[in-house]
Amino acid sequence: MKKIVTVLSLMLGCASAMAQSFPDRALTIVVPYSAGGASDTVARAAGKLVAEATGQSVVVENKPGGATVIGAQAVLAKPADGYTVMLVAASFVINPHLLKLPYDPDKTFQPVALLASNPHVLVVNSKVPANTLPEFIAWAKSRNGDATFSSFGNGSSGHIGFEMFNQMANINMVHVPYKGAAPATMAVLSGEVDATLADIGVVTPHLASGKIKAISITGDQRAPTLPNVPTFKEGGMPNYFSQTWLGLWARSEVPQDRIQRLNELFNNAMKTSEMKSLLAQQGLQAGSTTPAEFGEFARSESQRYKQAIEKADIRVE
């Protein structure tokens, strides 16, 4: 019996040592979006901190296009050893409800960690005669389907989030998609469209211009960077919520000890004062979840988006 216990102890010790020795070479973070966005910024900053913690370099590869399909296929082409992971936004769980994908995300990928999130803020062009959420809803209804909203892409969290707003507020604003958050915001600034649901960090620098107004923010409390902007709850819509989130995924075959190690490394990176400061500048908040918790969160988000997509009969050609 003692021999069996000794052997088991040695085996567990070896497994623990192997887990701690990972990674012993460079890691790669695939970002399926263009360089310069929030996902790219978070990937590079977190990668730098993970590199410092492990002594191994972390390379960020931008693989934009194909609604994250190009980036996902790049990860699937790599060995399932945990050395290549993918950082994606909510579009990763939205796409299966809109597109015919060349892979099954539920079978080919597994969750690693929720890294960051931020609530969306409703902003409008300054010429829109509304300063509160009830006033905006009343104005949108008076336009009888002529009012417009921009998003940072078909099927993006901003697009589906606004469709949820349409449904809950009983309004019918028309979607105008743009290729990215910056052009979607500029469309509101110029008056090409009336409103948008945006990331806090994207629109905050433009609020001082007076060309756009922040009407309301999702979430249970006001944002520290926008203390004067009331929540949807304060505006009479307590059940409405829309957000951007960034999460890390790996191939489904990667061993669990390596998934746990990646979760630990990236969670530790997100908890640093350096990372929290960077996230605050982007209007983001650090996440901290186990792989199982992130998986449950992603499934919940997927179901929420699916219901909105089906109700609005949204299709992406």
Image (cartoon, rainbow, N blue to C red):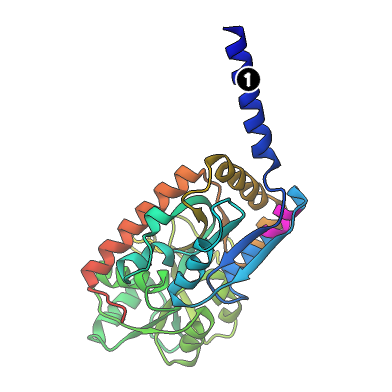
Q: Can residue 238 be seen in this view?
A: no
Q: Is residue 281 left or right of residue 90?
A: right
Residue tagged 1: 9
Which image quarter is the N terminus in? top right
Magenta stretch: give its range: 46-51
**Among the 4 quarters of the image, the one containing residue 46:** bottom right
Q: Is residue 289 left or right of residue 232?
A: right
* Residue 125 vertical placement versus 246 (above, below): below
User: Picture coordinates of residue 232 (x, y %)?
Assistant: 39, 63
User: Picture coordinates of residue 25 (x, y %)?
Assistant: 72, 53
Report if residue 306 lies within the magenta region.
no
Q: In this view, does 104 lie to the left or right of 200?
A: left
Which image quarter is the C terminus in? bottom left
**238 and 156: which is toward the camera:** 156
User: Picture coordinates of residue 74 (x, y %)?
Assistant: 53, 67
Q: Residue at x 31, y 86 (%)?
A: 147
User: Picture coordinates of residue 222 (x, y %)?
Assistant: 50, 60
Label 1 residue SS: helix
**Among the 4 quarters of the image, the one containing residue 178:** bottom left
Q: Which residue is drawn at 27% across and 75% down?
A: 314
Q: Main secondary structure of the magenta part?
A: helix
Report if residue 50 lies within the magenta region.
yes
Amino acid type of the residue tagged 1 in the rendering = Ser
**229 and 268: which is toward the camera:** 268
The mark total stands at 1
**275 and 228: which is toward the camera:** 275
Q: Residues within 10 Å of mark 1 (few under 14, many from 20)?
A: few
Q: Is residue 116 visible?
A: yes
Q: Which residue is drawn at 70% across and 50% down?
A: 272
